[in-house]
Image (cartoon, grey):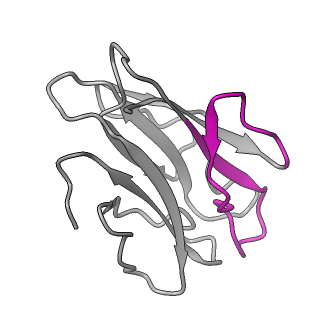
Amino acid sequence: MPVADIMILMGDEQAPPGWVKDPADLNENAGGDYLYLAFRRESPVAHPITDIYFLRSSDRGAQPPEGFKKIEVDLNRNAGGDYIFLCYARDDRHEPIEDLKVITSSSAKPSPPPGFRLIDTDLNSNAGGSYIYLCERKDTVLA
């Protein structure tokens, strides 16, 4: 089932019914707020999420590329480092994202889980802590 929506949860906030909360803290070992990725799958869905982009900037007000929607939660919230915002697009010309998984590592270039593609942005960039990456799976991605 395609990913229909994405959100960032704070602290012990629970995912709404029907949503999947990834258990990995997006600020692991960086000292910032506890943040978690949550997403909802739906089938059929008119306009599934097809692309994810991480906006890294020293400017909190930086805008995403055209066609992307920015989630207004700094993924390094209270951890220092770069401002990092998750942005996503719904483009019917691209394959939908079917699954998401956050991975943490002591390596700057970890291997994604089988069938997933690593999105090459460390979500703890310049904040210290573990290396944290989001991985996506599309039906067309084979590992």
Span shown in magenta: 12-39
Q: Nearer the viewer, residue 113 or 57?
A: 113
Q: Position of residue 3 (x, y in %)?
A: 42, 33
**Looking at the image, which residue is at 32% across and 24% down?**
90
Q: What residue do we see at 36% from left, 17% from top?
A: 44
State which quarter of the image contains the N terminus.
top left
In the image, 117 versus 1, the foreground residue is: 1
Please indicate whether residue 143 sits to the left or right of residue 55 in the image.
Answer: left
Give yes or no for residue 20 being in the magenta stretch: yes
* Quarter of the picture holding the C terminus: bottom left
- The quarter of the displayed image where residue 76 is located: bottom right
Question: Is 140 part of what is drawn in magenta?
Answer: no
Position of 23 with respect to 94 (left or right) is right
Q: Vertical placement of 72 versus 20: above or below? A: above
* Residue lying at 40% horizontally and 34% vertically, measured from the top left: 88
Give 128 or 96, whichever is nearer the viewer: 96
